[in-house]
Image (cartoon, rainbow, N blue to C red):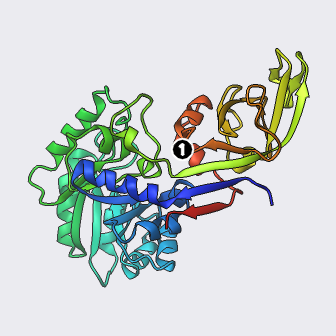
Amino acid sequence: MRPARALIDLQALRHNYRLARELTGAKALAVIKADAYGHGAVRCALALEPEADGFAVACIEEALELRAAGIRSPVLLLEGFFEASELPLIVEHDLWCVVHSAWQLEAIEKNPLHSPLTVWLKLDTGMHRVGLHPKDYRDAYERLLASGKVGRIVLMSHFARADELDAKATSEQIAVFETARQGLAAECSLRNSPAVLGWPQAAGDWVRPGLMLYGATPFDMPQAHAQRLQPVMTLQSRVISVRELPAGEPVGYGATFVSTRPTRVGVVAMGYADGYPRQAPNGTPVIVAGSRAPLIGRVSMDMLSIDLTDVPQATVGSPVELWGKQVHATEVASQAGTIPYQIFCNLKRVPREYVGD
């Protein structure tokens, strides 16, 4: 069998969830949208359910997958519903729902519901993606209560730049939120992963850890709390070929690497069809046979090449870590000009194996 696989450490996942709770003293919704950022939503939910306060997903399709797997904990739809016809399903499956737009509020008012909803009412505090305008927020809150169809409201917003620890934008968003919620009797939720780790002044009753659950830092600099995270996914494979090249020889498509010395080239069963970033440049690190080695040449669909010249113990069959506990996903993403969120979500074809049940 092809040796490429993703090892998912569920004990590390639980550690990271507990860290979010420890740092905030708040209840925590584990964000497992996009198939738990490529880690497998159902298996991650089953691992966390005994201690999690609930889960958050993007849409009703993701929520129904959890319900079908027997997950009975609260599940929040972060984008709410996309059409009013979803409301009966939301009620039937006891899902929590974000309301971020006037049309969603109107749909709740107009549609008969046989059980009251739990609504997370989203305020646009400055990201300008979705969320109600501050001038409309109190009215929306009062209309939801007056509708008789809502049993509970949580007030929420989302930070645009919490991963920039020196940016004023987050403090400004907090101030907008605090002003808008004055006099509204409800729990609050502001903090995503970077805010859990780096913005203790963003108080609230609920937090929404996402990326940090999977052990990757959202910051581009060292941060004390982020250094306590444990990587959950280890993307691994093996060397399938080794060849010796003299100086002056190209490697891979487009000759983006040309050897400057006699070079020992290893080929690894891993490529962009597996989710490894094609744009990863020469020098992107891997761990092979226990030692660090650089990527050389362009990443192919199914294979990539590494320089084994300084790793004499490596040979055909040697294990390779593409990212994980020794080479962090954030480092690989940075080299490739992207973010760890994307490289996790891009994972495909590679089978997942779970440890730490």
Which sits in the foreground, 84 or 153? 153
The answer to whether any part of residue 128 appears in the image is: no
Identity of the residue furthest to the bottom in this view: 114
Is 223 above or below relative to 34?
above
Q: Quadrant of residue 206?
A: bottom left
Is 119 above or below relative to 210?
below
Identity of the residue furthest to the front in this view: 313
Is 265 above or below relative to 241?
above
Residue drawn at (70%, 56%) of the image: 350
Q: In the image, residue 212 lies at what x, y percent?
A: 41, 47
The residue to which callout 1 is attached is 325
The answer to whether any part of residue 143 appears in the image is: yes
Residue drawn at (74%, 49%) of the image: 273
Q: Quadrant of residue 280?
A: top right
Q: Secondary structure at mark 1?
A: loop
Which sits in the foreground, 334 or 51? 51
For disc 1, the neighbor class at 10 Å (few under 14, some 14 to 19, many from 20) is some
Residue drawn at (81%, 36%) of the image: 266
Q: Is 39 displayed left or right of 264 in the figure? A: left
Residue type pointed to by label 1: Lys
Number of numbered callouts drawn:
1
Which sits in the foreground, 98 or 332? 332
Q: Is 180 displayed left or right of 46 in the figure? A: left
Q: Is 91 displayed left or right of 59 in the figure? A: left
Quadrant of the rendering where the N terminus is positioned: bottom right
